[in-house]
Amino acid sequence: MLAVTINFEAIAQITDDQFYQLCRENPDVKFERNAKGEIIVMSPTGGETGNSNSEINADFVIWNRQTKLGVCFDSSTCFKLPSGANRSPDVSWIKKERWDALTPEQKQKFPPIAPDFVLELMSPTDSLKDIQDKMQEYMNNQVKLGWLIDRKTRRVEIYRQGHEKEVLESPAELSGSDILPGFVLNLRSLWT
């Protein structure tokens, strides 16, 4: 996914409400905003990445329906992080009690909450450094667990709050450990 960053600082400071309205008025464009207030325009993914992302998201939804521990979100959900950044992970999950603590208005717009878990699936055009920076941004904003999956290199980077990044080469599966109790993501089909 190709991303273009636009800095409007010289002409305007875009408020949260204006950013939300910009996104609503341009539903065919995926926007994010970093902590500096720069707008990031994201291109759509290709078919293989979109399919893989959909399959992964389905695994999370099925697990969550069985456990009823939280709420799952797809890549079209934008979260307002504590740093002020607005980010849309490919897959994310929030514990039920944290989600339930938000007001109906907060849930309707860009929820002002960092997910407990995020997953980013690399697209062929993604910059590894940019996505790694994004993963670190998630950790700096109270996300507890993050997975960066690169299908091309068969590599997974695991980010945990308060721990060093862990790198796995061609793992068969990933465990959600204590953040996603009982969840196991089978990666075998991603590597074929």
Image (cartoon, grey):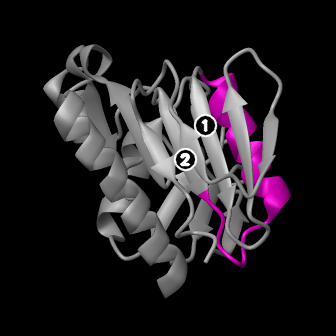
Contact, mark 1 vs mark 2 (Cβ under 8 Å): yes
Direction from residue 39 to residue 77 in the image, left or right: left
- Residue 88 in view in this figure: no
Residue at horizontal 36 percent and vertical 71 percent from the top: 26
- Separation of marks 1 and 2 at Cα, in angstroms: 6 Å
Magenta region includes residue 58: no
Q: Position of residue 113 (x, y in %)?
A: 42, 26
Position of 167 relative to 125 (above/below)? above
Whole-percent x, y for residue 148 in the image: 67, 50
- Residue 124's disc is none
Instruction: Please tell me whether residue 139 belongs to the stretch shown in magenta.
Output: yes
Residue carrying label 2: 119
With 173 as the anchor, is 159 left or right in this view?
Answer: right
The residue nearer to you, when weighing 135 against 103, is: 135
Q: Sequence order check: which comes first, mark 1 or mark 2?
A: 2
The residue type indicated by label 1 comes to Gly
> Which residue is most to the bottom?
47
Q: Is residue 183 above or below residue 21?
A: above
